[in-house]
Amino acid sequence: MKRLHTIAICLSLAGAIASGSAFAQPVAQQPAFVVGDSWEYKSVTTPGDKPGTWSRTIIAAPSDQEFKVRFQDNTVNSFDKTMNFMPEGNPSYARILARYPMKVGDGWEMSRRYADPRAVESGEAKVVAYEQITVPAGTFQCYRVEAKATLNNKSFAEASKWTRWYCPEVKHFAKESFEQTVTGSMTSGRNGTTLVASELVKFTPGK
């Protein structure tokens, strides 16, 4: 009887610890993005193991729902307030890879439209872990988000997968693995699988 009582106490303590851990799980609020925030990345594209660099810099906030972001080639594009790419400034064209508040276990469906009404992309994303990573810019605690989506058009199909580590300390992701498989394309050389691995080299906060 005494042994059963001891086991019951141990199970109760284990449950309390587990409950406390869940309760203490960190929750990331939407970052306070400002004009001037800038991220620089290094990348490797496979096949070919081709090295490269790319960047994003917030240069304007024309509304409370949009940022203007300059790319490394000096082109300017629209992003929503959680820094999801928003082609042509149209919210329905955005692919929601980041959603706040963010915590482990969160999940959501994605649906992205295009100017061509025949093309619709659908998928899902989930926050699967809160873990430490090290990249050239430093060591950070980050939320690992895994996402996948498919796009079917009349002439081709795309299957895309993302793994991103969103790190509150740098307001954005510090590491990304992006894989895309294209089939049925009439464009020479486009079919096949491409993998791009990117890591943050430098984050410069805006003023």
Image: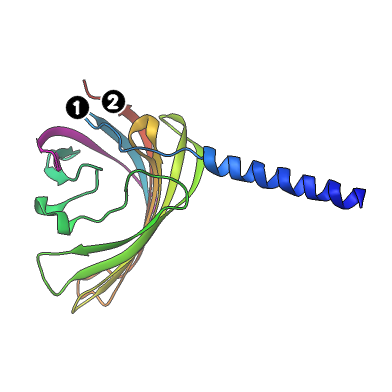
Residue holding disc 1 = 36
Q: Is residue 26 left or right of residue 58?
A: right
Q: Residue at x 60, y 45 (%)?
A: 19
Residue 98 position within the rendered picture, expressed as x and y whole percent measured from the top left: 32, 48
Residue 126 picture location, percent across and down = 41, 55
Q: Position of residue 30 (x, y in %)?
A: 30, 38
Query: Residue type at mark 2?
Result: Thr
* Residue 55 tag number: none
Asked whether 59 or 191 is in front, the reply is: 59
Q: Is residue 119 above or below residue 89?
A: below
**Residue plotted at (35% across, 39% down):** 42
Crowd rating for badge 2 (residues with CA inside 10 Å; few <14, some 14–19, many 20+): few
Q: Which residues are magenta?
A: 46-67
Q: Is residue 71 magenta?
A: no
| Majority secondary structure of magenta residues | strand
Residue farthest top in this picture: 207
Above or below, 204 against 84 in this view is above
How many other residues sit within 10 Å of disc 1, few (<14), some (14-19) or many (≥20)?
some
Which comes sooner in the sequence, label 1 or label 2?
1
Of 43 and 83, the residue lying toward us: 83
Place of residue 121 in the rendered image (x, y in percent of width and height, measured from the top left)? 25, 67
**In the displayed structure, does residue 24 sit left or right of residue 78?**
right
Circle 2 — which element? strand
Q: Amino acid at mark 1?
A: Gly
Q: What residue did someone put label 2 on?
A: 204
Kindly indicate whether the residue at mark 2 contacts the one at mark 1 (C-beta within 8 angstroms).
yes
Placement of 113 over or under 152, stated as above or below: above
Task: Residue 52: say if magenta.
Answer: yes
